[in-house]
Image (tube, rainbow, N blue to C red):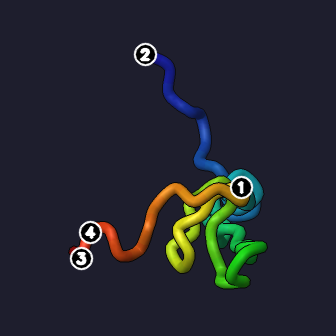
Amino acid sequence: MALPKRRHSYSRTHKRRAHDFLTAPSVGRCPECDEPKMPHQLCSGCGKYKGKAIYQLGDELA
């Protein structure tokens, strides 16, 4: 089994790990109620997706 001849330097390790960070999720605004929502997701404020009512807020409570 092959083994590395020398250890990698700190700068080489940090260069490799430069892209291993987390990115914040993108958040948009709902065009109907102007609440923040994730893209391509149902709006939790008004229950609409692409202008269509998918979920009525009073359905589950009744």
Residue that carries the numbered disc 3 in the rendered image: 61
Query: Which of disc 3 and disc 2 is earlier in sequence?
Result: 2
Outermost residue toward the front in this view: 62
Outermost residue toward the left in this view: 62
* Residue 12 in sight: no
Query: Which of disc 3 and disc 1 is earlier in sequence?
Result: 1
Q: Nearer the viewer, residue 13 or 43?
A: 43
Q: Nearer the viewer, residue 23 or 4?
A: 23
Measured from the top left, where is residue 22 in percent x and y? 61, 65
Residue that carries the numbered disc 4 in the rendered image: 60
Q: Quadrant of residue 39?
A: bottom right
Q: CA distance from mark 3 to mark 4?
A: 4 Å
Secondary structure under badge 3? Answer: loop
Q: CA distance from mark 2 to mark 3?
A: 63 Å
**Circle 3: residue type:** Leu
Q: CA distance from mark 1 to mark 2?
A: 56 Å
What residue sits 66% from the left and 54% below the top? 40
Query: Which of disc 4 and disc 2 is earlier in sequence?
Result: 2
Q: Quadrant of residue 50?
A: bottom right
